[in-house]
Image (spheres, rainbow, N blue to C red):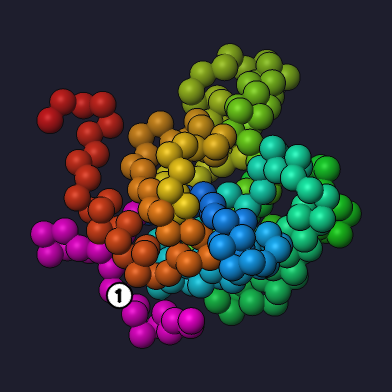
Amino acid sequence: MKFNIFKRKGRVARDNGSAVVPRHVAIIMDGNGRWARKRGLPRTAGHAAGAEVFRMIATYCKSLGVEHLTVYAFSTENWKRPEGEVSTIMQLLEKYLAESIEKMELEGVRLKILGDTSVLSPQLQALIAETGELSQTIDGMQANVCINYGGRDEIVRAAARCVADGVEPTEESISARLYTAGIPDPDLIIRPGGELRLSNFLLWQSAYSEFYVTDTLWPDFTPQELDKAFAAYGKRDRRYGNAK
């Protein structure tokens, strides 16, 4: 099934007649394996389908005016998966980055990789460096892709950098040393697949994020599903700990 997202431009969740579009949306792209299993396909087929959905949702978010989209592509724990599955995921990442280099400027989307990239293949590291350089020349929505990322690991690394820099660990000094330094905290975190947990994703940054969970598996996630999430977000009363 294909969607013409450009015909849907401007259609967003509404609350009291005014558009509600989160500045920063984060998504835990969950359910690829279950989607494939339900169809009698290998898990790798689910990851390939999920990669295409990411392209569609990223383009749709840009059309709605989202400034930052952060997705969980590969966690520090995902290395425990079967070698063939990990290899396929890495190949998909390489393919996506290579294609993004050709399209980023045309589509007006910047790309930033979050996570410990030092253990990735030389080819993947080179593509990450190239997309990073190109992103500096583009003014548009920023897509943040978490690869070999773990929230606890990120906090530990930030604290260690504070010590190495001779800086007292505070909320400000730690935030400035996270992978997400300079990126606003996510307003809305979406989890397809129905699981009710963060899975080590943006632990520091999600302190006051709103959450939306759907049973829809990631490869079945559509622009209409995003509309539902935004509609629910538009009804939330975000007080950040303050009394009403």
Q: Nearer the viewer, residue 188 or 35?
A: 35
Q: Quadrant of residue 179?
A: top right
Residue 166's place in the image compared with 214, above or below, is: above
Which residue is depicted at the point 22% across and 34% down?
239
| Residue 43, x across and y down, in percent | 68, 59
Residue 13 is one of the magenta-drawn residues: yes
Q: Nearer the viewer, residue 160 or 73?
A: 73
Amino acid type, label 1: Gly
Give the residues drawn in magenta, as a range: 1-22
| Residue 25, x across and y down, in percent | 43, 53
**Quick one: which residue is furthest to the right in this view?**
122
Tag 1 secondary structure: loop
Which residue is depicted at the point 50% across and 45% down?
183
Q: Quadrant of residue 208?
A: top left
The answer to whether residue 32 is seen in the rendering is no
- Dot 1 corresponds to which residue? 10
Which residue is depicted at the point 77% across and 60% down?
88
Q: Is residue 240 rendered to the left or right of residue 199?
A: left
Residue 61 is one of the magenta-drawn residues: no
Bin the neighbour count of mark 1 within 10 Å (Cα to Cα): few under 14, some 14-19, many 20 and up: few
- The quadrant of the picture occupied by the C terminus is top left
| Residue 100, x across and y down, in percent | 67, 71
